[in-house]
Image (tube, rainbow, N blue to C red):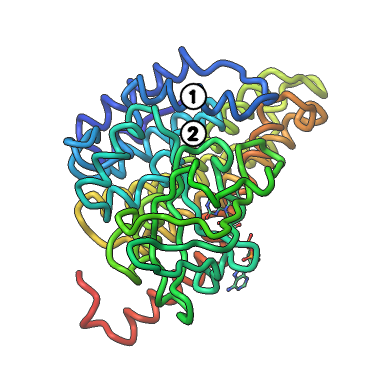
Amino acid sequence: MNRAHLEWPFFEPEHRRLAQEVWAWARKNLGEHPETDVDRTCQRLVRALGEAGFIRYAVGGQAYGGAKETIDTRAVCLIREALAYHHGLADFAFAMQGLGSGAITLCGNEAQRARYLPKVAQGQAIAAFALSEPQAGSDVGGLSTLAQQEGGTYVLNGEKTWISNGGIADFYVVFARAPGSQGSKGISAFVVDADTPGLEVAERLEVMAPHPLATLRFRDCRIPRAQRLGEEGEGFKIAMQTLDIFRTSVAAAALGFARRALDEALARATTRRMFGQTLAEFQLTQAKLAQMAVQIDTAALLTYRAAWLRDQGRRVTLEAAMAKLTATEHAQQVIDAAVQLWGGLGVKKGQVVESLYREIRALRIYEGASEVQQLIIARELLKAYQKPEEVSV
Ligand SMILES: Cc1cc2nc3c(=O)[nH]c(=O)nc-3n(C[C@H](O)[C@H](O)[C@H](O)COP(=O)(O)OP(=O)(O)OC[C@H]3O[C@@H](n4cnc5c(N)ncnc54)[C@H](O)[C@@H]3O)c2cc1C
């Protein structure tokens, strides 16, 4: 694969070294993977990625096993790009450790960080992020899981769905609201250990690109107050701050899938013969390949701009939304073009492009569907237009 983008000024020498390391590791350790037992594969991958030292980059705080004091967004993106290129489930296993523990890194107190983060970084504990509900996906403020305070405990009742790592996680960061509260106000975040009485896996969900996923049910699930993250009522802000980091990394994963699709397309187009020449010799094919390359570079520029800005300590709501929207939509088109170039073989089960076609689809939906990203971008634009003095330059 062409990795010329590593020369871009967004990166430090340590990022370039890390990218080489993760590519070499992925090539050596991530072969073909049967999708028969995703739970076990995922558990194995989390351990392997922890032992290889990569999950440390998705965790903040060196005292707690993190590679740095804060999450290194560029490192997370480079790792996701490389893992997605080689193995969708490996990317998922890595990403969920970060998303599932991100709220603890951002808002956990010392005891909470010390209890959870080192195990997450080493791949010894599996993390999950439980925000979505059957009636509240895009509309996060509509969530209805209740957290009723009773003395020194909170009692959780409700349902969470589409929870990645649901069923195999060791703990869930759960968002629930105070009784009587509405919208984004009154939501708090809690760390709930998977074996807490009153928490059950209500249903395992199967999707087109198999990943561990579940619906969780909370029935009078009592958790100590010490398990609350941040202040009471800060949950919505915590969820959005966590998503700001990992949204950019979804763009990086899409980029990895798209780069693999382009490589697969080049390999096929240059070897498949028809009408007396190779597929690549047709100008129609060249137009497709050119379009794919442009879509990939556009996505990469937006992704690493957002990652770099965040690593400078800047707020990246707008840039992360642009990166996620562009990278996921472009990757879908690039992968579709690769399937087309592969002809009938492109839809045959077990082909790389066939699995990429299934892998990419959910990325346009989770962590904010494309339409939600468009709304965020427009909102930020309008805000900047109407109150330019509040927008830093
Ligand atoms: C594979 C997978 C993994 C997931 N993992 C997690 C996880 O780990 N934790 C977690 O909490 N959640 C997770 N989710 C849930 C995910 O975040 C939600 O599916 C997503 O937010 C969309 O919510 P929804 O499915 O309820 O769709 P809905 O909210 O019903 O939206 C349906 C569609 O409506 C459109 N839409 C939405 N808003 C607007 C608008 N304002 N204007 C116009 N159109 C709009 C979009 O096209 C959207 O796809 C996961 C989902 C999937 C598919």
Residue 386 x %, y %: 33, 87
- Provide the residue designation for mark 2: 93
User: Farthest residue in the bottom direction?
Assistant: 386
Residue 31 x %, y %: 56, 16
Describe residue 364's horizontal placement relative to residue 284 as left or right: left
Q: Is residue 333 visible?
A: no
Secondary structure category for the residue under label 2: helix
Q: Residue at x 31, y 44 (%)?
A: 73
Up/down of 91 relative to 1, above or below? below
Query: Quadrant of the image for the C terminus?
Result: bottom left
Examine the image and state in which quarter residue 157 appears: bottom right
- Provide the residue designation for mark 1: 45
Asked whether 372 or 42 is in front, the reply is: 42
User: Farthest residue in the front direction?
Assistant: 151
Q: Residue at x 30, y 41 (%)?
A: 74
Q: Residue at x 41, y 46 (%)?
A: 99
Q: Is residue 230 visible?
A: yes
